[in-house]
Amino acid sequence: MTKPVDDPTAERLAAALRCATVSTDDPADADTAAFDRLDAHLEQSFPLVHAQLELERFGYSRLYRWPGSEPDRVAAILLAHQDVVPADHPQRWTHPPFAGVVDDEFIWGRGAIDDKSRVVAILEAVESALAAGVRPRHTVYLAFGHDEEVFGGDGAERMAERLRRAGVRADLLLDEGGVITEGVADGVRQPVATVMLGEKGYATVRLSVTEVGGHSSMPGRQTAVGRIARAVSRIQDHPMPLRLTPVIADMLARLRQVMPAPRRRLLGFVGVVAPLITRVLAARPTTEAMVRTTTAPTVIRGGVKANVLPQHAEALVNFRILPGDSVDSVLEHCRKVVRDNGIHLELVGMSSEPSSTTGPGPAFDVIADVARAIVPGIAVTTGLVPGATDSRHYDDLAGTRCNFAPIVLNERDLASIHGTDERLSRVNYARLIEFNRRLIDHFAAATTSAVQTSGVDA
């Protein structure tokens, strides 16, 4: 049984989750009424934000400017997105995916983790700061996209271009991606906060073939379905090479400090034993993505009836591209391993190159210090976002890019993102609000020299 809501911050997030702002590949199919309801809810819930910050709209995306007392310098661009993916099999959910239920422990609903919680938490923090008379020393932007789940072409891409034209260059770009995990980092007992410093690229390759067709009683030596199946098998059986990138080497060096002694000794020679380390990481899907451009056959089509040889067959294979590889190198790799000139290969849909990666730097130290203050006893490391986020559109607009939220998730929680029973604990949501409020207080207090030399007092 759920109990009456006694936490207004949890209820404001739950009300946002009740707006089924599902992204669609064709904008004409979007439920605009749901986005309208979310608009109205945000503006009603955060009156000071909407009275004191400048707001520019890009469709349903929202770009806020909070001028600092020294407005020509930009402290941060804080990103989040309002849209969500559909909820498959809603009957399997503990609570309906768009009911926005709050119980003693959790706030339930699609978007609770990805990513409405961050939209509303940032606004909670800014509203609180405004009520307390806090003003940042340097300008802060909030950029809330409405189509991140379908690559952000009408939202984040337009907002980023607007900032680019205005000559904006921030000290920090902060978006979704990294979290604090429990029991996920092998051999590490304490919770690990992974502050991502970049993200992998994205590409989908379509393989297609045309054959004569005919009756299945007289097949030729090759059929369209057989050739496509063989080509997909070759691509999957010959993945792109393992490689230890500088970001992942840094991640392992930081984790080494909290690992058992045998692993500490092994990682002390990371440069020498890099091939061994990459093979160990490649043994699990969750860590293989750190050291390889991943290969995922996702769709195969061909044929309409059991006794008819199809004239056409095709397959889609999705790649998440490690820095150092590229969209072109993925396509060339596919051609090399398929070894069938009759198979046509082409890129389909949106693709993106791996992002540039910034060094940890002073802004990273600020994020790490605030995270440690909110969740004591964590280990903090770096990493790469394996998926795609809106921040790739802002790649050149900040000195340091971080993808992180200080929420503590286990494997079940991680599986609920884009899955069943997405939920966020009320404790985690309180952490998220506090994290953003502490960042704002830092932006208000920091001088140029403080940003360059220090973080937040933990």
Image: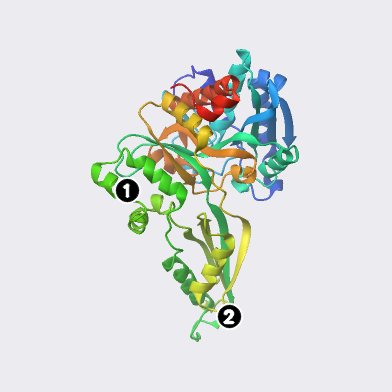
Asked whether the viewer can see residue 36, the reply is: no
As helix, strand or loop, the secondary structure at mark 1 comes to: helix
Number of residue marks: 2
Q: Residue at x 53, y 47 (%)?
A: 199
The type of residue carrying mark 1 is Leu
185 vs 110, left or right, is left
Residue that mark 2 sits on: 211
**Residue 241: x %, y % from top left:** 44, 63
Residue 277: assigned label? none
Establish if 292 lies above or below 362: below
Foreground disc of the pair 2, 1: 1
Image-quadrant location for residue 391: top right
Q: Residue at x 32, y 38 (%)?
A: 257
The type of residue carrying mark 2 is Glu
Residue that mark 1 sits on: 267
Asked whether the viewer can see residue 66, the reply is: yes
| Alpha carbon separation for disc pair 2 and 1 | 52 Å
Q: Earlier in the sequence, mark 2 or mark 1?
A: 2
Q: Residues within 10 Å of mark 1 (few under 14, many from 20)?
A: many
